[in-house]
Image: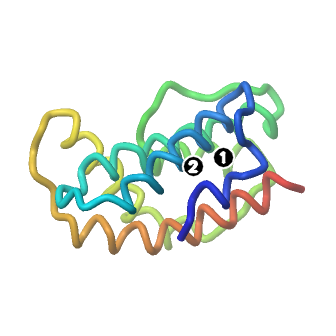
Amino acid sequence: MIYQELFKDFENTKNLSGKAWEHAVAIDLLNSSNIEDCSIHCFHYQQMFECFFKHILETKSQFGSYSKSHKLNKLLEEVIGATAFKTNKSKYRSDLIVITVCAEEYRYNFDIDCQGYLDSVVICNELLKELISFEKQ
C-alpha cells in the first residue's frame, strides 16, 4: 500500500490531516529502504493514525475536540461516539492495541515482534480506508 496516495487530499495541509500525510510519506520512504527493524515504521504508522483520528474528531464532532490519548483503540471509541462514523470496532480493537504498544516500545528502544506488527497493519489498513472514506463525506 502506498500511504501518501491514500492521504493525497491532505498533502501539506496545515492541520492534523497534513501531519498524517507527513507520516504517510515517512512510512513510504521506510517501506522502500532496507531497514530491518520495523519499530520506526510502527512509530510513524501509529502517529499517522493518531493524527488522522484527531483530525476527524476536530472536524466532524460536535465540539471539535479530542482527548490527549495516544491509544488508538481509545481514539476509535471517541470517533465512533462523537461522530457519525460507524464500524465494527471489535474487528480492529486488538490490532490497534498492538500498534499502540509497538509504538510505545519504539520510544523506549525495545525490540518488537515485526511479523505480529505487520499482521496488525494489514487489518488496520482496512480501518484506515474506512476512515478516509468517512472523512471525504
- Provide residue 74's location: percent of width, then percent of height: 48, 44
- Provide residue 57's location: percent of width, then percent of height: 70, 37
Name the residue that disc number 2 marks.
Answer: 77
Measure how far apart labels 1 and 2 are at the Cα level: 6 Å
- Quadrant placement of the C terminus: bottom right
Look at the picture and state if 105 lies above or below 65. Answer: below
Residue extending farthest to the left is 110
Viewer-nearest residue: 121 or 24? 24
- Provide residue 135's location: percent of width, then percent of height: 79, 52
Residue at horizontal 34 percent and vertical 44 percent from the top: 43
Q: Given contact means CB atoms under 8 Å apart, are the residues at marks 1 and 2 in contact? A: yes
- Provide residue 59's location: percent of width, then percent of height: 80, 34
Question: Helix, strand or loop at disc 1?
Answer: helix
Amino acid type shown at disc 1:
Val
Residue at horizontal 44 percent and vertical 74 percent from the top: 122
Viewer-nearest residue: 73 or 33? 33
Look at the picture and state if 51 lies above or below 2. Answer: above
Residue extending farthest to the right is 137
Residue at horizontal 79 percent and vertical 58 percent from the top: 134
Scheme of image coloration: rainbow
Q: Residues within 10 Å of mark 1 (few under 14, many from 20)?
A: many
Q: Tell whether 64 sits left or right of 27.
A: right
Q: Residues within 10 Å of mark 2 (few under 14, many from 20)?
A: few
Amino acid type shown at disc 2:
Glu
Q: Tell whether 72 sits left or right of 13.
A: left
Q: Tell whether 92 sits left or right of 94.
A: right
Question: Helix, strand or loop at disc 2?
Answer: helix
Viewer-nearest residue: 75 or 112? 112
Residue at horizontal 68 percent and vertical 38 percent from the top: 17
**Label annotation for residue 79:** 1
Residue extending farthest to the front is 33
